[in-house]
Image (cartoon, grey):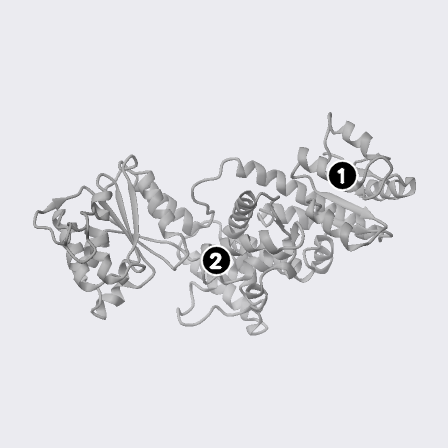
């Protein structure tokens, strides 16, 4: 285990912290000045650095800048007896993990160092995982089903219909289908049929001849021609006008089409992938979508789950988006505390993955500290009351499962619905899993229950693990081990 490094010109501060950390079983290495610490960095590195802000021979802020240049992921806690605004702002702008004013409560300091140590371990795992970022992220069973389907379709030219809510990543799936298909060397052309006015959509799809209409000063190739030899992605196909649906059906039937104003048939070798957030069967019943076109598109259907159905993916997605935003902005990536992550995972995300991405970009710009706490989250996340959605954060948590066995019109019962309501719902979920022949039902439900308890306790204690363990009546080592086993620190 790497050491906790302390640098302070005050011997008494070093001595007190050394003894306190030694009682916690944490290895410590102390320095009286920044110069000696920088020299030690040439041969070794700490897990956490605790530094005074004003020392002879170099300030803690200068040291912070030099350390961050060499070890950007190292949590650094800045101590100071001068609790002024400029020092705090400068510390956080320099990438400090936390700012600790003197005199400090020793137990508070130790708890803060513990949090920084856990953050260091988490960052090490995150950096290793980020070394090879896949084109799509998702550990949830529903996403694994999508990945398996993409794999099975990798050698196919068949038409695919992707359904899912807005912002759930339908175009990413379409691009993955193209990338892993025999047409990967050909073009991938995407068009949102709902974003283009009806009068222009026909020309966009099929092109036009010169003089076909006012303003058509030159012949233009449409998206079908542009996608020849590759894939054409028709997003929001459910909004396509009826007359254009007829033309699209002809192309899918015989591969031929005409440019607007053209008289010679053209042929394009195109694989069509369509997507919609709408219920096409209902659109057919309403008479606004052709049934024959629906069946032509609905050869293989992939349903992309909403983000609230794959809550266990939120941590890895959030970390990825925070890192990407930081790279774009040229800053150090923000990190989510356990409590902030629990709150984030309790949100329904009606805008799905796209909304989560926007939230992470907002946090990268607006969060005041490197470690994001619940109070730093956008108002739309804080205004939603914490209900049964909070435990849904964990893979297959009970509320997520309960939603599968209740009426689609009714929300899953909250834990507070009655003294024994959650027990009844857990029994119902157990019955469903047993009837379906699912393996290891005991293990699955136990993990969900434990994860829900721990996440709720962390939210109540604002991420303080020791306090959460005390409230739950378990040991500090137990909660740390459970968090790791359940993947709650991912």
Q: Which residue is mark 2?
A: 355
Question: Which x, y percent locates residue 276?
Answer: 31, 58
**Tag 1, which secondary structure?**
helix
User: Quarter of the image containing the N terminus?
Assistant: top right
In the picture, measured across the screen, residue 221 lies left or right of residue 422, that is left
- Number of numbered discs visible in the structure rendering: 2
In the picture, measured across the screen, residue 214 lies left or right of residue 189, that is left
Question: Which x, y percent locates residue 23?
Answer: 83, 43
User: Which one is earlier in the sequence, the residue at label 2 or at label 1?
Assistant: 1
- The residue that appears at 72% across and 60% down in the rendered structure is 471
For the residue pair 291 and 482, the one nearer the viewer reads as 291
Question: Which x, y percent locates residue 350?
Answer: 46, 63
- Alpha carbons under labels 2 and 1: distance apart: 38 Å
Q: Which residue is mark 1?
A: 62
- Please tell me in which quadrant of the rendered image residue 457 appears: bottom right
- The residue that appears at 50% across and 66% down in the rendered structure is 425
Question: Which x, y percent locates residue 142?
Answer: 41, 52
**Residue extending furthest right?**
12
Figure check: 285 above or below 461: below
For the residue pair 167 and 424, the one nearer the viewer reads as 167
Tag in front: 2 or 1: 1
Assess disc 2: are there few (<14), some (14-19) or many (≥20) residues with their C-alpha within 10 Å of its C-alpha: some
**Residue extending furthest left?**
263
The answer to whether residue 450 of the structure is visible from this angle is no
Q: Which mark is residue 20?
A: none
- The residue that appears at 43% across and 72% down in the rendered structure is 410
């Amino acid at each position: 285990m790497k050491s906790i490094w302390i640098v302070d010109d005050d011997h008494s501060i070093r001595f007190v912290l050394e003894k306190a950390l030694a009682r916690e079983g944490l290895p410590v290495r102390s320095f009286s000045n920044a110069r000696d610490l920088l020299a030690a960095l040439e041969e070794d590195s700490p897990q956490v650095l605790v530094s005074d802000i004003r020392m002879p021979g170099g300030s803690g802020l200068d040291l912070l800048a030099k350390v961050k240049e060499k070890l950007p992921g190292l949590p650094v806690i800045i101590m100071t007896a001068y609790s002024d605004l400029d020092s705090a702002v400068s510390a956080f702008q320099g990438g400090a993990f936390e700012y600790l004013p003197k005199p400090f409560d020793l137990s508070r300091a130790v708890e803060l160092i513990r949090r920084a140590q856990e953050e260091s371990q988490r960052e090490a795992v995150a950096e290793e995982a980020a070394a090879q970022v896949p084109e799509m992220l998702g550990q949830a069973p529903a996403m694994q089903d999508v990945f398996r389907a993409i794999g099975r379709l990798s050698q196919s030219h068949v038409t695919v219909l992707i359904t899912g809510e807005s912002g759930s990543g339908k175009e990413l799936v379409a691009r993955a289908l193209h990338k892993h298909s025999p047409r990967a060397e050909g073009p991938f052309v995407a068009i949102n049929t709902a974003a283009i006015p009806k009068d222009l959509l026909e020309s966009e799809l099929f092109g036009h001849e010169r003089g076909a209409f006012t303003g058509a000063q030159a012949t233009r190739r449409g998206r079908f021609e542009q996608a020849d030899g590759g894939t054409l992605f028709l997003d929001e196909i459910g909004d396509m006008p009826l007359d254009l649906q007829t033309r699209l059906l002809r192309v899918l039937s015989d591969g031929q089409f005409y440019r607007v104003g053209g008289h010679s048939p053209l042929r394009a070798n195109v694989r069509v992938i369509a997507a919609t957030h709408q219920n096409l069967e209902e659109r057919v019943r309403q008479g606004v979508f052709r049934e024959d076109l629906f069946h032509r598109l609905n050869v293989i259907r992939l349903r992309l789950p909403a983000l609230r159905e794959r809550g266990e993916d939120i941590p890895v997605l959030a970390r990825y988006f925070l890192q990407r935003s930081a790279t774009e902005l040229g800053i150090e990536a923000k990190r989510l505390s356990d409590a902030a992550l629990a709150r984030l995972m309790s949100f329904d995300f009606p805008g799905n993955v796209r909304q989560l991405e926007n939230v992470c970009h907002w946090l990268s710009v607006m969060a005041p500290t490197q470690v994001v706490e619940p109070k730093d989250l956008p108002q739309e996340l804080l205004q939603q009351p914490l209900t049964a959605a909070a435990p849904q954060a964990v893979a297959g948590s009970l509320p997520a499962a309960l939603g599968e066995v209740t009426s689609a019109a009714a929300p899953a019962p909250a834990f507070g619905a009655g003294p024994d309501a959650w027990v009844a719902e857990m029994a119902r979920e157990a019955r469903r899993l047993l009837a379906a022949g699912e393996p290891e039902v005991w293990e699955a439900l136990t993990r969900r229950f434990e994860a829900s308890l721990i996440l709720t306790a962390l939210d109540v204690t604002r991420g303080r693990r020791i306090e959460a363990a005390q409230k739950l009546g378990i040991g500090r080592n137990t909660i740390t081990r459970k968090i790791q086993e359940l993947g709650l620190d991912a």
